[in-house]
Image (cartoon, helix red, strand yellow):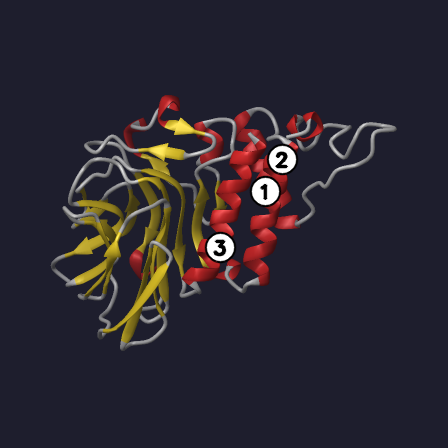
Amino acid sequence: MALAAKIPYDHPYAGGFPGLGGQALPTDSDCLTYLAAVKAADGAGVEVGVAVAVDAFFRDTKAAGVFDALEACCILAGARTLAGALVPVVGDAPTNVADGFAGGDYSRTDGLTGDGSTTYLDTGRPQNSDPQNDAHISVFITASGTAASVRYAGTTDTSAGSYLLLYDDNSFTGAYVSSNSITDVSNRTGVNLVGGTRDSSSQQTARVDGVSNTTAVASIAPTTLNSYVFCRNLNGSPNAFSDATIAFYSIGTSLSLEDLETAVTNLINAIGEAL
């Protein structure tokens, strides 16, 4: 990575040094608003290389028709500090409950690592914020962790029989649970997006390890519980904590999980190359 790409994106010479040519800078207006908020939280702007990677994510998701489906979303990588990583791309900022996560849990290239017992994020987004038949949830995992039977993100309301959930069982089988139904998919073998989406009353799609699986299952009304990340919200309490490393999460309306995975994979890879 060239030295020029290591200076803050808003440095006077960020676009290039006199006589030495220029370099690309972020241009998407929503991205610039996000980067400014991250700078305010971090105390300094991210490097040009990181900023350009984030800008590409904004542009790619918009071009794929995915961006507007993101209603609560964080890039848990790239920022200089944990505070910056918790700045939302869209929606409300998540709550670092009881300040459980600390700076040592955060890697700029890999994301945020749970402890498998107490640390989690409250997204502040109730499951019923999205329509019963128009919803998605996703996380991008860079390390699966060691804990078994964990929940990466979501909600479970047993009184209503309503679920919006991403989990690993003892054999690390990813699954998406929604509207009182379970869709199992292939065993996780690598770092990638784990997500699920529903755009009809009769079926839902899960994606793990780059493979999507659509299953015919009927939907039911969503719950009022907030979705958590690094565990699930079980009837109002955190449950089944994960010690995975997560670099991104999103919740919102239905979308193409394949297009989202491509954009997030490119984002995390580009951040790693920039740093």
Q: Which residue is mark 3?
A: 262
Q: Is residue 93 left or right of residue 198?
A: right
SS class of the residue under badge 3?
Answer: helix
Residue type marked 2: Gly
Q: Position of residue 110 (x, y in %)?
A: 42, 34
The amino acid sitting under disc 1 is: Ala
* Residue 249 appears anywhere in the view: yes
Residue pointed to by mark 1:
53
108 sits to left or right of 31 = left
First along the sequence among labels 3 and 2: 2
Q: How many marks?
A: 3
For mark 1, does the 10 Å Cα neighbourhood hold few (<14), some (14 to 19), or many (20 or more) residues? Answer: many
Disc 2 and disc 1 in contact, CB within 8 angstroms: yes
Query: What is the x, y in percent for residue 202?
Result: 27, 77
Sort mark 3 into few (<14), some (14-19) or many (20+) by Cα contacts within 10 Å.
Answer: some
The C terminus - image quarter:
top right
Residue drawn 55% across the image and 35% down it: 273
SS label for mark 2: helix
Q: Secondary structure at mark 1?
A: helix
Q: CA distance from mark 3 to mark 1?
A: 13 Å
Residue 184, percent from left and from top: 21, 61
The residue that label 2 is drawn on is: 49
**Mark 2 → mark 1, Cα distance in angstroms:** 6 Å
